[in-house]
Image (cartoon, grey):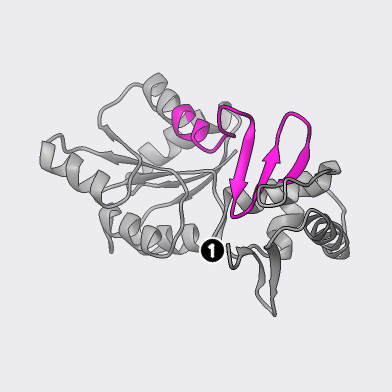
Amino acid sequence: MKLLLVEDEKRMVQALSELLRQEHYEVDACTDGPSGLAAAEGNLYDVIVLDVMLPGMSGFEIAKSLRRQGIRTPILMLTAKSELDDTVEGLDSGADDYLTKPFMARELLARLRALLRRNLPSGDGTLSFGDIALDTNTVSLVCTATSQRVRLSEKEYRILEYFIVNQKRVLTREQLAEKVWGFDSDAEYNNVEVYLSFTRKKLAFVGAKTSIKALRGIGYELRCEDV
């Protein structure tokens, strides 16, 4: 899991980064508001741990900006404040959960696990977007409009899963290669193009209006039109 930590207290950053890496998170850390916002906008994270009081821009402002842009990454907000109004403002700004300092490490980890579970498939084993659904039990693609179904390869499934979890975000070839083939993979970027082509054919086969659109020089986006 890839996590962004935005916290200005350097000792806290060091301690939390060590704790989270021990729990097998890959951690990027920023110590001010503007760099935290830039990191969240420019990278794909599974979860963001965001302090409220930051130099240059508050955690509230960062959360609001991300949500306005359609970035749905779960946010756990940290603060030394405990007043009800601050909790309400944090949640209203787009945070998914709120943790007051000081806190126990096990509570932080439990809150993160709870947030990450929200990105898992629904109780019936599906991930959905537009007129398509991924059946996680049979590794199949289903068009909900036509009821057509087709089996997916592992890479095709992981590509569509990544798009659905990050719906309304543009994904680059580099991000797809990193997430689908892995950090240590030697896969060339043309492998991404090849499997995107395979995935598009599966979408067409089931008659879906959902498609993977190429944005020249930028990346790819999952779109569903006329549904």
What residue do we see at 60% from left, 28% from top?
A: 124
Amino acid type at circle 1 is Gly
Q: Judge whether residue 155 is colored magenta.
A: no
- Where is residue 136? Give x, y as percent: 71, 33
- 33 vs 95, nearest the viewer: 95
Q: Which image quadrant: the C terminus? A: bottom right
- Does 101 sit left or right of 63 as displayed? left
What is the x, y in percent for residue 182?
Answer: 77, 46
Residue 135 on image: x %, y %: 71, 36
Q: Is residue 37 left or right of residue 150?
A: left
Residue 134 highlighted magenta (yes or no): yes
Residue 219 falls in image quadrant: bottom right
Give the residue pinned by disc 1. Answer: 42
**Residue at point 81%, 49% (across, down):** 156
Residue that protrudes farthest toward the bottom in the picture = 216
**132 and 33: which one is in front?**
132
Q: Which quadrant of the view contains residue 223?
A: bottom right
Identify which residue is drawn at 80% across, 61% down.
204
**Residue 183 visible, this orientation:** no
Q: Between residues 224 and 43, which one lies in front from this camera angle?
A: 224
Helix, strand or loop under label 1: helix
Res 38 → quadrant = bottom left
Q: Is residue 174 left or right of residue 77?
A: right
Instruction: Please count the marks in the image.
Output: 1
- Drawn side of residue 166 relative to residue 90, left or right: right
Q: Quadrant of the N terminus?
A: top right
- Nearest the viewer among 73 and 127 is 127
Are there few (<14), some (14-19), or many (20+) residues within 10 Å of tag 1? few
The span picked out in magenta is 113-142
Residue 186 at x, y percent in the picture: 87, 53
Q: Residue at x 49, y 28 (%)?
A: 113
